[in-house]
Image: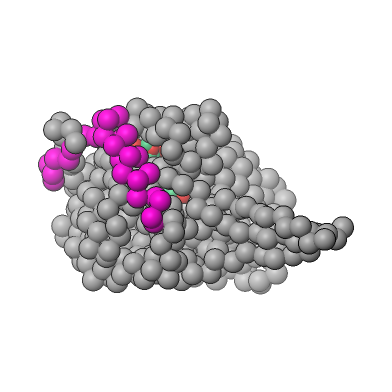
Amino acid sequence: MTETTFDVLNPATGQLIERVADGTVQDATEAVHAAAAAFASWAVTPARMRAEILRRCYDLMVRDTDALACLIATENGKSVQDARAEVTYAAEFFRWFSEEAVRGEGTYGDAPGGGAKTLVTHVPVGVAALITPWNFPAAMATRKIAPALAAGCTVVLKPAEETPLTALALARLLQEAGVPEGVVNVVPTTDAPSVVSAWLKDERVRKISFTGSTGVGRILMRQAADRIVNASMELGGNAPFVITADADIDEAVAGAMIAKFRGGGQACTAANRFYVHEDVIDEFVEKFSAAVEALEVGPSSNHENQIGPVISQKARAGIAELVKTAIADGARVAVQGTVPDTGWFYPPTVLVDVPVRAHILSKEIFGPVAPIVSWTDEAEMLKSANDTEFGLAAYVYAGRLQDALRIAEQLDAGMVGINRGIISDPSAPFGGIKQSGIGREGAHEGIREYQETRYFSVDWS
Ligand code: NAD
């Protein structure tokens, strides 16, 4: 392993947390050697045994919740409350896929023309390359590792450069749970393009599962095309949050606070644009603004704080620029909180009178800024809500379920929260349509992303 290291910084203070080995292409290739060597035995390890190891991973994550939450909060900057919620969510993928691992279903059927039987089965795809972002350093890793291991695959994982410590802590925990050597290999690096393209060129790597921005997803799909590598993509979002005239506004405010401000707005499922019916917009803005003003902003070292910094100076500058364009487009700042002097904090902000064509509505804000648009005509509102290349998440608050469902069905999104501000659930298929991705994580579908379907045609004459 390389002796060169890179610094992992706390975004709330800019201070060094730890130095981590900076993985090279050679390290990446060695990780594939290890994963390929371990694949032969892991793939044929009885599913029950794999399931029990995954279940122990769940138990150990639950045991270590406090320590993992502190680590996530320190390297990512999110509040300790959000980090604890992430650990719980992340651990659930191990429990869920320990249960899925033993449901190795296939089919046995008759060819309609007679004379043959058809046996269908599912086999692990092989060594999988997993690439994760910084915004959920634990959950994005377990959402991939758990189904991969349940299917019988071995993995090489490249965590985001900003948050490698959580992935390394998870790797130690997996070892303690009994995951055999070589099954999970973590390679932190500051040179993601070289490491990942080395994996995509390596004929032993048969799968890539990527979570991150749509732009990087495109690059990796192009590279995967060269060897027809099986690719799953969980990409960017631009979620509309729709409120109808008869919605319960207190409930909508509570949902909006979670959908917008969890992780400081740095979630792919974060509400990015609020479409509020004209009849209720004043009430919503008043109550929502009051809730936003009450948010405690500051470093996660104070466990009472609810909003931390954004991930970097660059991210903060990007958010500030988007707010500037919104104001130039005619938006007005209804509320803007205050933030500490040090660290990459951006104040929670509510923007009102945002024109439907405002530039900010077309971008993934990835920060604690809530632009609010007023609507009266449902068809027009839906057209605006769907006017984006993204299609990951959406939210609808409505008084009548049939109205909520009618709107939800017409929103171009892989996932819609109905009278709920949170949609992530390990037992449900997470993923996007349009340019938000290909494939699903979690649910029964999640394990299929790491399997090939094979069939045997048996002479029955
Ligand atoms: P990013 O695309 O910049 O980085 C994601 C990962 O890709 C990181 O590990 C990074 O090191 C790596 N990477 C960057 N450039 C690369 C390259 N050229 N070749 C190979 N690897 C490369 O995204 P980010 O800023 O870390 O995360 C934010 C984005 O992720 C947002 O767009 C967000 O919506 C998306 N996201 C999506 C989901 C989802 O499930 N759909 C979940 C979380 C985040």
- Residue 13 point in image, percent of width and height: 15, 44
In the image, what residue occupies the spot 27% across and 65% down?
Answer: 177
Residue closer to the observer: 59 or 19: 59
Within the image, what quadrant is residue 438 found in? top right
The total number of labels drawn is 0
In the image, what residue occupies the spot 41% across and 62% down?
Answer: 45
126 relative position to 82: left or right? right
Which residue in the rendered view is the most extreme toward the right?
Answer: 113
Reply above or below: 228 against 305. Answer: above
Reply above or below: 183 against 28. Answer: below
- State whether residue 297 appears in this view: no
Is 277 inside the magenta-drawn segment? no
Give the magenta part as a residue range. 14-42
Q: Quadrant of ligand 1?
A: top left
- Residue 430 point in image, percent of width and height: 52, 56
Quadrant of the snapshot with the N terminus: top left
In the image, what residue occupies the spot 52% across and 41% down?
Answer: 231
81 relative position to 381: left or right? left
Quadrant of the snapshot with the C terminus: bottom right
Question: Magenta span: helix, strand or loop, mainly?
Answer: helix
